[in-house]
Amino acid sequence: MSKNSEDIKAEVLKMGAQARAAARALTKLSSEKKNEILRAMADSVMANEAAILEANEKDLAAADELGLTAAMKDRLRLDSERLAAIAGGIREVADLHDPTGEIIREWDRPNGLRIQKKRTPIGVIGIIFESRPNVTSDAAVLCFKTGNATILRGGKEAIHSNLALAAALQEGGAPAGLPDHSIQLIPFTDRESVRYMAEMDKYLDLIIPRGGAGLIEAVVSMARMPVIKHYDGICHVYVDKQADLDMAEDITVNSKIQKPSVCNALETLLIHKDIAPQFAPRIAQNLSAKNVELRGDEKFRELCGIDSVKEATDADWTEEYLDYILAVKVVDDLDAAISHINHYGSHHTESIVTGDEAAAEKFQLECDSATVFWNASTRFSDGGEFGFGAEIGISTDKLHARGPMALEELTSYKYLVFGDGQLRG
């Protein structure tokens, strides 16, 4: 749906005001009430299956015209099984612990004042995302569970699906007590809507862009409120000289090909020069047999003995392939591996494979990334795998959230101070 710029601005501002009012109402809901509403939302998704799938068919029919790849079409597609999974995910969020209202810390001052640091909702969160309609549900219910109102802005490729899902959530939750306008989805896809959201600091407390580098950079350049970025996943595995090579092979393969199109998949493999003569040929043969295109530095290409390995360029060290492509480099030592990661990486996820505890501790301390593994696949960098339940994304920022973002990361805090007449002298 397209409108002129002034109409878009007016509509976005109206939605912002409505969301602010909803946020105030949401703070009054108990955890039990929020869980009741979430279960009603899940029921509504299933009750509206026909309408949601019909809307999804409209988006799929326009996919070729929009130039969507096969992978993007797959992410866009909904069916009965995927809708059931969306509803199941909502029920899982209802079962999760609600962090709002928790006392983070409590202490007494010498003057008799008692101070509590209490977890609170952020307020109104704007989320801008591309392609996947399930994000509509994931984002909305995680924000709602933590008492936040949500304004969602999806891409044009999923507009009909997103509108149908958002309507099912808001309309399904309303009879159970969901405040009006708690979940809103901008009903048009003009680029101006992103700009007006990013400028709406009167109503939005936080904005989270999920998508390609172009989208994220645009939001960051325009935003007047804090932004939490879900940026590139240039993830590394470093195979140390003290690595168990069988373990290293398994971790490398799983990190790369278990699901190559996601942000926690391996993109660059680093190999210590002392074990490279043994490890390079075997990992090259294994990955090549699985149709992974290898791009190696001179030493790796010399050692692996496979003519199909392409010569890596500097651009390969900063590339998020999201595909069956892997860059490989042989490094002199642990310090060289850490230096490469901190220079070329995106501060997302790294892993070291080693039997040397001191090397692992140094790697985990000095790699400036949100998640750093020792002897495990990068694919575990995920809110669900961390036991958080659902996640809203993986932040590559440092403030206020870093790594997998779940319920706690969608809260802020306030200080409650209790006195009995104290005056400051």
Image: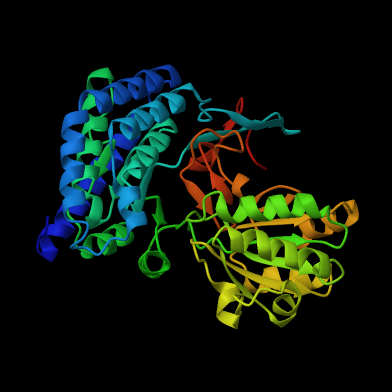
In the image, residue 164 sits, relative to residue 335, either above or below, namely above
Q: Which of 250 and 92 is in front in this view?
A: 250
Q: Is residue 397 above or below residue 222?
A: above
Image location (x, y in percent) of residue 119: 54, 34
The location of residue 418, given as percent across then percent down, is 60, 28
Residue 35 in percent (x, y) is at 40, 21
Residue 19 left/right relative to 304: left
Using the rendered view, name the quadrant where residue 301 is placed: bottom right
Horizontal side of residue 81 vs 270, given as left or right: left
Q: Give the number of callouts.
A: 0
State the image coordinates of residue 37 (x, y, percent, origin top left).
33, 22
Q: What residue is shown at x 62% (from left), y 45% (from top)?
A: 380
Q: Nearer the viewer, residue 87 or 376?
A: 376
- The N terminus is located in which quarter? bottom left
Tell me which residue sits at (45%, 28%) in the image: 93
Give the quarter of the figure containing the C terminus: top right
Residue 317: image quadrant is: bottom right
